[in-house]
Image: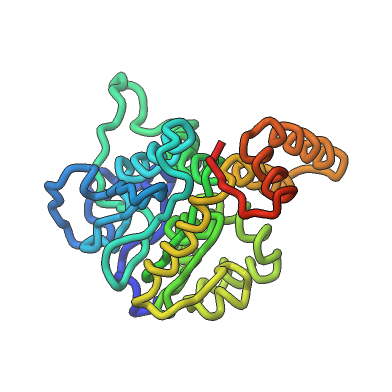
Amino acid sequence: MSGSLPALRILGTSSGSPVHKNLPRSARRRVGWPAVSDERSLNEQVRLDYRDSVAWITIDRPESGNALTPPCRDRVRDILNGLNTSHRARCAVITAVGDRFFCTGADLRHSYDDPDRSTEVPDRIMGDARRMMLDGQYALFDALLDCDVPVIAAVNGTAAGMGAHLALACDLVIAGDRAKFVEVFARRGLVPDALGPWLLPRIIGVRRTMELFLLAEDLPADRAHEYGLVNRVVPHDEVLSAAAEWAERLASGPSRSFALTKWLVNRSLDTDRASMAHDEAVAVELNTSTEDAAEGVASFQERRPPEWKGY
Protein backbone atom coordinates (compact mmCIF):
# COMPACT_ATOMS: atom_id res chain seq x y z
CA MET A 1 0.00 0.00 0.00
CA SER A 2 1.24 3.47 -0.81
CA GLY A 3 2.98 5.21 2.04
CA SER A 4 0.93 8.30 1.30
CA LEU A 5 -2.09 6.79 3.03
CA PRO A 6 -2.52 5.68 6.64
CA ALA A 7 -1.36 2.12 7.14
CA LEU A 8 -4.42 0.21 8.31
CA ARG A 9 -7.37 2.41 7.70
CA ILE A 10 -10.04 0.94 5.40
CA LEU A 11 -10.19 4.13 3.43
CA GLY A 12 -13.37 4.96 1.63
CA THR A 13 -15.42 2.19 3.19
CA SER A 14 -18.74 3.50 4.36
CA SER A 15 -19.24 3.32 8.10
CA GLY A 16 -22.64 1.95 7.23
CA SER A 17 -21.21 -0.73 4.96
CA PRO A 18 -21.47 -4.48 5.47
CA VAL A 19 -17.70 -4.66 5.99
CA HIS A 20 -17.84 -2.27 8.91
CA LYS A 21 -20.88 -3.93 10.46
CA ASN A 22 -19.18 -7.35 10.25
CA LEU A 23 -16.34 -6.14 12.44
CA PRO A 24 -16.66 -6.98 16.13
CA ARG A 25 -17.85 -4.00 18.16
CA SER A 26 -14.44 -3.69 19.82
CA ALA A 27 -12.70 -3.60 16.44
CA ARG A 28 -14.97 -0.96 14.93
CA ARG A 29 -13.29 1.68 17.06
CA ARG A 30 -9.75 0.38 16.46
CA VAL A 31 -9.65 0.27 12.67
CA GLY A 32 -7.81 3.16 11.08
CA TRP A 33 -6.45 6.35 12.52
CA PRO A 34 -5.19 6.51 16.10
CA ALA A 35 -8.00 7.58 18.37
CA VAL A 36 -8.48 11.33 18.38
CA SER A 37 -10.96 13.03 20.62
CA ASP A 38 -12.89 15.74 18.82
CA GLU A 39 -14.91 17.76 21.28
CA ARG A 40 -15.94 20.32 18.70
CA SER A 41 -19.49 20.74 17.56
CA LEU A 42 -20.69 19.21 14.32
CA ASN A 43 -20.97 22.71 12.83
CA GLU A 44 -17.26 23.22 13.50
CA GLN A 45 -16.24 19.91 11.94
CA VAL A 46 -18.20 20.66 8.77
CA ARG A 47 -18.38 24.41 8.39
CA LEU A 48 -20.87 26.37 6.31
CA ASP A 49 -19.93 29.93 5.38
CA TYR A 50 -21.77 32.24 3.02
CA ARG A 51 -19.65 34.63 1.00
CA ASP A 52 -22.05 36.75 -0.96
CA SER A 53 -24.05 34.21 -2.96
CA VAL A 54 -21.59 31.32 -2.59
CA ALA A 55 -21.94 28.63 0.08
CA TRP A 56 -18.56 27.30 1.21
CA ILE A 57 -18.77 23.81 2.74
CA THR A 58 -15.48 23.06 4.49
CA ILE A 59 -14.56 19.72 6.05
CA ASP A 60 -12.46 20.64 9.08
CA ARG A 61 -11.12 17.35 10.42
CA PRO A 62 -7.47 17.40 9.27
CA GLU A 63 -6.30 15.30 12.21
CA SER A 64 -8.50 12.50 10.82
CA GLY A 65 -7.55 12.98 7.18
CA ASN A 66 -10.81 14.91 6.78
CA ALA A 67 -12.64 11.59 6.95
CA LEU A 68 -16.36 11.89 7.57
CA THR A 69 -18.20 10.40 10.50
CA PRO A 70 -21.85 9.60 9.76
CA PRO A 71 -23.02 12.81 11.50
CA CYS A 72 -20.53 14.85 9.43
CA ARG A 73 -21.60 13.09 6.25
CA ASP A 74 -25.24 13.79 7.07
CA ARG A 75 -24.48 17.44 7.76
CA VAL A 76 -23.01 17.80 4.24
CA ARG A 77 -26.16 16.14 2.89
CA ASP A 78 -28.45 18.44 4.87
CA ILE A 79 -26.54 21.56 3.79
CA LEU A 80 -26.87 20.58 0.13
CA ASN A 81 -30.58 19.83 0.49
CA GLY A 82 -31.08 23.14 2.28
CA LEU A 83 -29.58 25.10 -0.59
CA ASN A 84 -32.53 24.07 -2.76
CA THR A 85 -35.03 25.85 -0.54
CA SER A 86 -33.18 28.63 1.27
CA HIS A 87 -32.02 30.38 -1.93
CA ARG A 88 -29.24 31.97 0.12
CA ALA A 89 -26.61 30.72 -2.31
CA ARG A 90 -26.47 30.35 -6.07
CA CYS A 91 -23.32 28.23 -6.09
CA ALA A 92 -21.53 25.98 -3.58
CA VAL A 93 -17.92 24.92 -3.04
CA ILE A 94 -16.86 21.80 -1.16
CA THR A 95 -13.30 21.86 0.18
CA ALA A 96 -11.30 20.91 3.26
CA VAL A 97 -8.82 22.24 5.79
CA GLY A 98 -5.12 21.42 5.53
CA ASP A 99 -2.51 20.73 2.89
CA ARG A 100 -2.68 16.93 2.72
CA PHE A 101 -6.25 15.65 2.59
CA PHE A 102 -9.46 16.60 0.83
CA CYS A 103 -11.43 13.65 2.22
CA THR A 104 -10.23 10.12 2.93
CA GLY A 105 -13.64 8.53 3.07
CA ALA A 106 -15.55 7.41 6.14
CA ASP A 107 -14.15 7.65 9.65
CA LEU A 108 -14.46 4.08 10.88
CA ARG A 109 -13.65 5.00 14.46
CA HIS A 110 -17.17 6.26 14.93
CA SER A 111 -19.09 4.14 17.42
CA TYR A 112 -22.69 3.10 16.88
CA ASP A 113 -25.66 2.58 19.09
CA ASP A 114 -27.15 -0.56 17.63
CA PRO A 115 -30.95 -0.66 17.63
CA ASP A 116 -32.54 -2.33 20.62
CA ARG A 117 -33.31 -5.91 19.77
CA SER A 118 -34.60 -8.97 21.47
CA THR A 119 -31.82 -11.08 22.91
CA GLU A 120 -32.97 -13.82 20.55
CA VAL A 121 -32.26 -11.69 17.46
CA PRO A 122 -28.70 -11.51 16.02
CA ASP A 123 -26.74 -8.25 16.17
CA ARG A 124 -27.05 -7.96 12.40
CA ILE A 125 -29.69 -9.44 10.15
CA MET A 126 -30.28 -9.33 6.42
CA GLY A 127 -31.39 -5.88 5.29
CA ASP A 128 -29.59 -3.85 7.97
CA ALA A 129 -26.50 -3.03 5.90
CA ARG A 130 -28.49 -2.26 2.76
CA ARG A 131 -30.72 0.11 4.72
CA MET A 132 -27.78 1.89 6.34
CA MET A 133 -26.04 2.39 3.00
CA LEU A 134 -29.15 3.75 1.31
CA ASP A 135 -29.95 6.06 4.21
CA GLY A 136 -26.32 7.11 4.63
CA GLN A 137 -23.82 7.53 1.82
CA TYR A 138 -26.34 7.19 -1.02
CA ALA A 139 -28.54 9.90 0.47
CA LEU A 140 -25.47 12.16 0.45
CA PHE A 141 -24.81 11.51 -3.24
CA ASP A 142 -28.47 12.02 -4.11
CA ALA A 143 -28.31 15.42 -2.42
CA LEU A 144 -25.11 16.31 -4.26
CA LEU A 145 -26.18 15.20 -7.72
CA ASP A 146 -29.68 16.64 -7.36
CA CYS A 147 -28.65 19.96 -5.80
CA ASP A 148 -30.15 22.84 -7.80
CA VAL A 149 -27.07 25.04 -7.56
CA PRO A 150 -23.75 24.26 -9.26
CA VAL A 151 -21.33 22.56 -6.86
CA ILE A 152 -17.56 22.91 -7.25
CA ALA A 153 -15.04 20.58 -5.60
CA ALA A 154 -11.85 22.38 -4.56
CA VAL A 155 -9.56 19.39 -4.02
CA ASN A 156 -6.65 20.41 -1.82
CA GLY A 157 -5.10 16.97 -1.23
CA THR A 158 -5.76 13.24 -1.25
CA ALA A 159 -9.31 12.18 -2.08
CA ALA A 160 -9.78 8.48 -1.38
CA GLY A 161 -12.68 6.06 -1.67
CA MET A 162 -15.91 7.79 -0.77
CA GLY A 163 -13.91 11.03 -0.53
CA ALA A 164 -12.84 10.68 -4.16
CA HIS A 165 -16.43 10.11 -5.21
CA LEU A 166 -17.55 13.12 -3.18
CA ALA A 167 -15.29 15.27 -5.34
CA LEU A 168 -16.06 13.56 -8.64
CA ALA A 169 -19.83 13.80 -8.16
CA CYS A 170 -19.56 17.59 -8.06
CA ASP A 171 -20.41 19.51 -11.22
CA LEU A 172 -16.93 20.98 -11.59
CA VAL A 173 -13.64 19.82 -10.08
CA ILE A 174 -10.59 21.99 -9.47
CA ALA A 175 -7.57 20.17 -8.06
CA GLY A 176 -4.28 21.37 -6.71
CA ASP A 177 -1.15 19.96 -8.28
CA ARG A 178 -0.45 17.96 -5.10
CA ALA A 179 -3.88 16.32 -5.08
CA LYS A 180 -4.41 12.67 -5.86
CA PHE A 181 -7.40 10.37 -6.21
CA VAL A 182 -7.32 6.83 -4.86
CA GLU A 183 -9.81 4.03 -5.51
CA VAL A 184 -8.47 2.20 -2.50
CA PHE A 185 -11.03 -0.60 -2.21
CA ALA A 186 -9.06 -3.41 -3.89
CA ARG A 187 -6.12 -2.81 -1.56
CA ARG A 188 -8.27 -4.22 1.25
CA GLY A 189 -10.27 -6.75 -0.73
CA LEU A 190 -13.37 -4.58 -0.75
CA VAL A 191 -16.01 -3.83 -3.37
CA PRO A 192 -16.22 -0.18 -4.51
CA ASP A 193 -19.16 1.69 -3.06
CA ALA A 194 -20.34 5.30 -2.63
CA LEU A 195 -21.71 5.21 -6.21
CA GLY A 196 -18.23 4.85 -7.70
CA PRO A 197 -19.27 1.96 -10.00
CA TRP A 198 -22.11 4.14 -11.33
CA LEU A 199 -20.21 7.41 -11.50
CA LEU A 200 -16.81 6.58 -12.96
CA PRO A 201 -17.82 4.63 -16.09
CA ARG A 202 -20.05 7.54 -17.07
CA ILE A 203 -17.18 10.01 -16.78
CA ILE A 204 -14.16 8.07 -18.06
CA GLY A 205 -15.54 4.86 -19.57
CA VAL A 206 -15.34 1.22 -18.56
CA ARG A 207 -11.67 0.53 -19.40
CA ARG A 208 -10.20 3.31 -17.29
CA THR A 209 -12.67 2.64 -14.51
CA MET A 210 -11.48 -0.97 -14.39
CA GLU A 211 -7.89 0.26 -14.29
CA LEU A 212 -8.59 2.49 -11.30
CA PHE A 213 -10.68 -0.05 -9.40
CA LEU A 214 -8.59 -3.17 -10.03
CA LEU A 215 -5.07 -1.73 -9.79
CA ALA A 216 -6.01 0.72 -7.02
CA GLU A 217 -3.06 2.97 -7.81
CA ASP A 218 -2.78 6.61 -6.80
CA LEU A 219 -4.01 8.88 -9.60
CA PRO A 220 -2.18 12.22 -9.52
CA ALA A 221 -4.09 15.37 -10.38
CA ASP A 222 -2.46 15.79 -13.79
CA ARG A 223 -3.47 12.28 -14.87
CA ALA A 224 -6.94 12.79 -13.42
CA HIS A 225 -7.19 15.84 -15.66
CA GLU A 226 -5.99 13.81 -18.63
CA TYR A 227 -8.66 11.18 -17.89
CA GLY A 228 -11.39 13.81 -17.72
CA LEU A 229 -12.07 13.48 -13.99
CA VAL A 230 -10.84 17.00 -13.23
CA ASN A 231 -11.64 20.26 -15.02
CA ARG A 232 -8.57 22.23 -13.96
CA VAL A 233 -5.29 21.61 -12.18
CA VAL A 234 -3.79 24.66 -10.50
CA PRO A 235 -0.84 25.25 -8.17
CA HIS A 236 -1.62 23.96 -4.69
CA ASP A 237 -1.81 27.42 -3.15
CA GLU A 238 -4.29 28.60 -5.79
CA VAL A 239 -7.00 25.96 -5.34
CA LEU A 240 -9.33 28.10 -3.26
CA SER A 241 -8.86 31.26 -5.31
CA ALA A 242 -9.50 29.35 -8.54
CA ALA A 243 -12.65 27.83 -7.05
CA ALA A 244 -13.78 31.23 -5.80
CA GLU A 245 -13.34 32.73 -9.26
CA TRP A 246 -15.59 30.14 -10.88
CA ALA A 247 -18.06 30.17 -7.99
CA GLU A 248 -18.53 33.93 -8.14
CA ARG A 249 -19.05 33.72 -11.87
CA LEU A 250 -21.69 31.01 -11.52
CA ALA A 251 -23.36 32.75 -8.58
CA SER A 252 -24.00 35.78 -10.76
CA GLY A 253 -25.53 33.70 -13.56
CA PRO A 254 -29.03 32.47 -14.47
CA SER A 255 -29.57 30.05 -11.58
CA ARG A 256 -32.79 28.40 -12.79
CA SER A 257 -31.22 27.73 -16.16
CA PHE A 258 -28.25 26.12 -14.39
CA ALA A 259 -30.56 23.93 -12.28
CA LEU A 260 -32.43 22.67 -15.33
CA THR A 261 -29.17 22.14 -17.22
CA LYS A 262 -27.84 20.01 -14.36
CA TRP A 263 -31.06 17.99 -14.35
CA LEU A 264 -30.87 17.35 -18.08
CA VAL A 265 -27.21 16.34 -18.09
CA ASN A 266 -27.61 13.97 -15.15
CA ARG A 267 -30.79 12.51 -16.65
CA SER A 268 -29.00 11.89 -19.94
CA LEU A 269 -26.81 9.26 -18.28
CA ASP A 270 -29.76 6.95 -17.66
CA THR A 271 -32.36 7.63 -20.32
CA ASP A 272 -33.10 6.88 -23.96
CA ARG A 273 -33.16 9.40 -26.79
CA ALA A 274 -36.96 9.78 -26.95
CA SER A 275 -37.23 10.35 -23.21
CA MET A 276 -34.37 12.82 -23.37
CA ALA A 277 -36.14 14.79 -26.10
CA HIS A 278 -39.24 14.96 -23.90
CA ASP A 279 -37.25 16.03 -20.83
CA GLU A 280 -35.43 18.67 -22.83
CA ALA A 281 -38.71 20.11 -24.11
CA VAL A 282 -40.09 20.20 -20.57
CA ALA A 283 -36.96 21.96 -19.28
CA VAL A 284 -37.05 24.53 -22.06
CA GLU A 285 -40.71 25.31 -21.40
CA LEU A 286 -40.17 25.54 -17.64
CA ASN A 287 -37.27 27.90 -18.14
CA THR A 288 -39.32 30.28 -20.28
CA SER A 289 -41.41 31.08 -17.19
CA THR A 290 -38.41 32.53 -15.32
CA GLU A 291 -37.56 36.21 -15.11
CA ASP A 292 -34.00 35.45 -16.13
CA ALA A 293 -35.16 33.89 -19.40
CA ALA A 294 -37.11 37.06 -20.18
CA GLU A 295 -34.07 39.12 -19.22
CA GLY A 296 -31.87 37.05 -21.52
CA VAL A 297 -34.10 37.78 -24.51
CA ALA A 298 -34.50 41.46 -23.59
CA SER A 299 -30.77 42.00 -23.11
CA PHE A 300 -30.06 40.37 -26.47
CA GLN A 301 -32.58 42.58 -28.24
CA GLU A 302 -31.33 45.68 -26.45
CA ARG A 303 -27.69 44.76 -27.02
CA ARG A 304 -26.66 45.04 -23.39
CA PRO A 305 -25.24 42.66 -20.78
CA PRO A 306 -27.93 40.69 -18.96
CA GLU A 307 -28.68 41.35 -15.31
CA TRP A 308 -29.51 37.98 -13.80
CA LYS A 309 -31.70 37.72 -10.70
CA GLY A 310 -31.45 33.99 -10.14
CA TYR A 311 -35.16 33.28 -10.63
Indicate the position of residue 72 as horizontal and vertical percent values: 31, 45
Residue drawn 30% across the image and 40% down it: 71
Indicate the position of residue 275 as horizontal and vertical percent values: 82, 38
Quarter of the image with the N terminus is bottom left
Give the side of residue 12 with respect to residue 98, left or right: right
Indicate the position of residue 108 as horizontal and vertical percent values: 30, 52
Residue drawn 41% across the image and 47% down it: 53
Residue drawn 46% across the image and 60% down it: 153
User: Residue 71, relative to residue 305: is it above or below?
Assistant: above
Indicate the position of residue 138 as horizontal and vertical percent values: 50, 42
User: Residue 37, relative to residue 77: is it above or below?
Assistant: below
Question: In this orientation, does residue 190 appear?
Answer: no
**Most foreground residue, 116 or 254:** 254
Question: In this orientation, does residue 273 appear?
Answer: yes
Quarter of the image with the C terminus is top right
Residue drawn 26% across the image and 68% down it: 98
Residue furthest to the right in view is 274
